[in-house]
Image (cartoon, grey):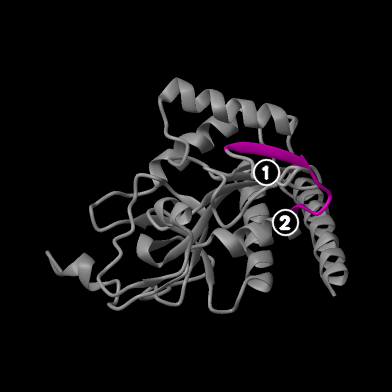
């Protein structure tokens, strides 16, 4: 069954790449090309993620007044108070967000730098976990993804090698004094592979060496099943909480 699902998603990945070529043949404006590619990825997520999750795009805020930039993909859970229109930009509350992504037609060095800046802006947002909220996660993930949801990049193609992408991320962190969990969490390049930050190596999602040791920090791997592995990563790292109180009151009632 696993092989059947893996092959099916691999075919979807091929179709998405073909969609990119169709888009290039149809549109000349970069904005139109980008919108079409983003739509195809959001459609994929709607089909393969659990039905309790909703997929949109827009901006995210927290109860401290922090705000993200425009975000290509926003995945919300069933506790998000309302969902407006699936194909138009919306405003989201971070407590109801499971993960967000930026979609790139072609990931360039400049595009990667801009995306890293956007990820840092998003990672300033903070989830307020109310009293009585139930969570089930490792301590590592509670400190990481339950403070601010995972942020990732999906690139349909890139002239950059996976190792180069990883090195540019590490260099950006050093140059801007960014903590390892305060920027992008993963990069997925279709038909190429992925680059993932495994944090302290004690999270629920781990990458083991042949000797069974869990890797810390950034690692990359070639893969011809990128979308399949992206779904696996998301299913593990997206925060799952049972809220004791609704989200909206803390935004509209001061001190709630």
Horizontal arrangement in the rendering, residue 243 relative to residue 52 (left or right) = left
Q: Is residue 105 magenta?
A: no
Residue 16 or 64: which is nearer the viewer?
64
The residue that appears at 57% across and 37% down in the rendered structure is: 217
Residue 83 in the figure: left or right of residue 195: left
Q: Which of the image's four quarters has the C terminus? A: bottom left
Span shown in magenta: 217-226
Q: State the mark number for residue 229.
A: 2
User: Residue 51: x percent and y percent?
Assistant: 59, 79
Q: CA distance from mark 2 to mark 1?
A: 20 Å
Q: Is residue 221 above or below residue 61?
A: above
Q: Tell me: residue 250, above or below residue 126.
A: below
Mark 2 lies on a secondary structure that is: helix
Residue at the spot of label 1: 213
Res. 40 in view: no
Q: At x 22% / y 65%, what residue is drawn? A: 251
The part of the image, by quadrant, that contains residue 170 is top right
**Mark 2 residue crowding within 10 angstroms, few (<14) / some (14–19) / many (20+):** some
Q: Nearer the viewer, residue 152 or 137?
A: 137
């Amino acid at each position: 069954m696993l092989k059947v699902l893996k092959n099916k998603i691999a075919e979807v990945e091929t179709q998405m790449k073909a969609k990119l070529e169709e888009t290039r043949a149809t549109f000349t404006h970069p904005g139109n090309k980008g919108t079409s590619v983003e739509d195809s990825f959001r459609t994929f997520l709607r089909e393969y993620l659990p039905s309790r999750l909703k997929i949109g795009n827009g901006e995210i805020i927290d109860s401290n007044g922090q705000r993200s930039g425009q975000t290509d993909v926003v995945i919300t859970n069933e506790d998000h108070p309302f969902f407006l229109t699936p194909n138009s930009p919306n405003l989201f509350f971070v407590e109801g967000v499971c993960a967000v992504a930026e979609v790139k037609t072609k990931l360039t060095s400049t595009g990667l730098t801009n995306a890293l800046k956007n990820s840092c802006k998003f990672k300033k947002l903070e989830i307020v976990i109310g009293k009585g909220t139930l969570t089930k996660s490792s301590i590592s993930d509670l400190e990481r993804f339950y403070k601010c949801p995972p942020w990732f990049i999906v690139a349909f193609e890139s002239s950059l090698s996976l190792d180069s992408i990883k090195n540019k991320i590490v260099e950006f962190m050093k140059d801007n004094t960014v903590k390892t969990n305060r920027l992008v969490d993963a990069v997925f390049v279709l038909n190429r592979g992925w680059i993932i930050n495994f944090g302290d190596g004690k999270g629920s999602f781990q990458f083991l060496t042949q000797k069974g040791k869990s890797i810390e920090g950034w690692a990359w791997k070639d893969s011809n099943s990128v979308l399949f592995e992206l779904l696996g990563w998301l299913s593990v790292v997206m925060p799952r909480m049972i809220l004791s109180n609704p989200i909206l009151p803390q935004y509209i009632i001061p001190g709630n």
